Image: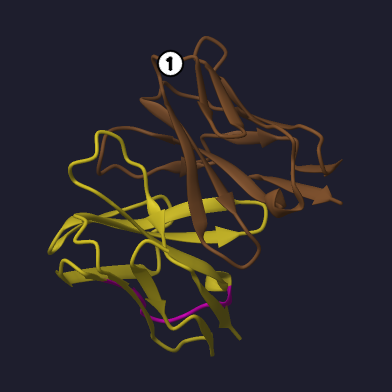
Chain colours: A brown, B yellow
Amino acid sequence: SQQGEEDPQALSIQEGENATMNCSYKTSINNLQWYRQNSGRGLVHLILIRSNEREKHSGRLRVTLDTSKKSSSLLITASRAADTASYFCATGEQAGTALIFGKGTTLSVSS
Amino acid sequence: DAGITQSPRHKVTETGTPVTLRCHQTENHRYMYWYRQDPGHGLRLIHYSYGVKDTDKGEVSDGYSVSRSKTEDFLLTLESATSSQTSVYFCAISEETASYNEQFFGPGTRLTVL
């Protein structure tokens, strides 16, 4: 069953704007991860945040986690056309266990 | 794509025929996974492996079987393909030594069952 649900399903912005995607999940987690998928390609890991962390940064990415609300957000600052892709959140446990993915947010960045 | 290849990349087959998809890794990672991706459903786990000859079922395992006779290869078999198995199939791997289950994905196989 689906664990994460991303919101919005689709997002269109202009280059240079910020893009925010949200993810809600249902059960307790060990960690939450965000992945990017370019059209016709496999998923690429972007960032992982542990359940005891509240915020994490990686380049232009900022992820927050609120375990009390069972939600996470991914912020991409100063978006570029190359950021056009689908973004998925996934919840996980320890190494060797499967991830449970949400349905994704499709981001379109126009120049 | 992190030393993961999938073959074939595209396949068209007919209902009732057997199909085998192959995932090959050069990373020597212990864990391997098969997912399917469908519009409106995201990625769903079919089967996974935690070592040679050690496999377990995922959320949508009905109609699929897997085998792992070597660390580097994880095979997904559709014994008798059905149209509902038309999908894009992704293989993923993760390390045994990782504290968390970050996964690395292959490029995918697009399967069409007519």
Element marked by disc 1: loop
- What residue sits right under mark 1 in the picture? A53
Q: How many numbered marks are there?
A: 1
* Magenta highlight range: B74-83
Would you say residue B80 sits in the magenta stretch?
A: yes
Where is residue A76? Give x, y as percent.
Answer: 67, 34
Q: Nearer the viewer, residue A92 or A1?
A: A92
Q: Amino acid at mark 1?
A: Glu
Where is residue A33? Give x, y as percent.
Answer: 47, 36
Relative to residue B73, is residue B51 depicted above or below? above
Residue B70 as seen in the image, left or right of residue A28? left
Would you say residue B87 sits in the magenta stretch?
A: no
* Residue A10, quarter of picture: top right
Chain of the residue under the numbered disc 1 shown in the image:
A
* Residue B114, quarter of picture: bottom right
Q: Nearer the viewer, residue A27 or B25?
A: B25
* Residue A95, quarter of picture: top left
Relative to residue A50, is residue B5 depicted above or below? below
Q: Nearer the viewer, residue B90 or A76?
A: A76
Where is residue B5? Give x, y as percent.
Answer: 37, 73
Where is residue A18? Give x, y as percent.
Answer: 76, 32
